[in-house]
Amino acid sequence: MLPPLATKILNVTLYQIGWFCCVLGAAWGYPLTGSLSALALCAVHIVLAKTRMSEVKLMLSACLLGVIVDSAQQAFGLLFFKSSPGWPLWLPPWVFVIWAQFATLFHYALYWLKGRYLLAGLFGMVGGPLAYWAGIRMGAASFGNNPVITIMVLALVWATVTPALCRWSVYLDEHEGAYRWRRSR
């Protein structure tokens, strides 16, 4: 059985590896390979989760929210995501998966944000733009015409999105049971 700290470290590690799979897969021209690799890590998370259905609900909700947020940003010309030429959807597959990856953190590594929505907003306001900036620097996306405006919009969006996902995870926690990985205490 894993102690709580080890569970959180494993959770962050799975997320971070998945994030790199998505971003570097897109940047290096293998978006589908990166997406599938990160999706496999999401599956590992679900297998380890005690309440699998709740985790799936949180991940699907984050994907839906991500599609709305990132589609709007792309439609307004703030960001442009690298995709395969034959991909039929507006957003590349790795964008969907990276949002699911992010959702895996809320019941484990980001559990300390539970009930601290202002702190969650501040965390999102800083962390969200930094993650996008890193992905852009690695070549998975590009800024629109005005990077300063894009960063400001990202900060505002993530100051809203992070507490919203945090609150949704609390709701699921209260209505569907305690969250632990199957092998943790």
Image: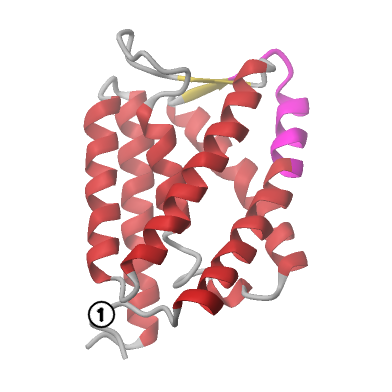
Residue pointed to by mark 1: 182
Looking at the image, which is closer to me, 150 or 106? Answer: 106
Counting from the top left corner in percent of width and height, residue 177 is at: 44, 80
The answer to whether 106 is drawn above or below residue 141 in the figure is below
At 35% from the left and 26% from the top, the residue drawn is 26
When the figure is inspected, residue 139 is found, relative to residue 12, above or below; the finding is: above
Residue 16 location (% of width, % of height): 38, 53
- Residue depicted at x 50% and y 65%: 106
Q: Residue furthest front?
A: 175
Q: Classify mark 1: residues with Cα within 10 Å, few (<14), some (14-19) or many (20+).
A: some
Label 1: which secondary element = loop
Q: Quadrant of the N terminus?
A: bottom left
- In the rendered image, residue 112, in percent from the top left (x then y), is placed at 58, 77
Report the span colored magenta. 143-156
**145 up-or-down from 78: above or below:** above
Q: Residue at x 70, y 13 (%)?
A: 145
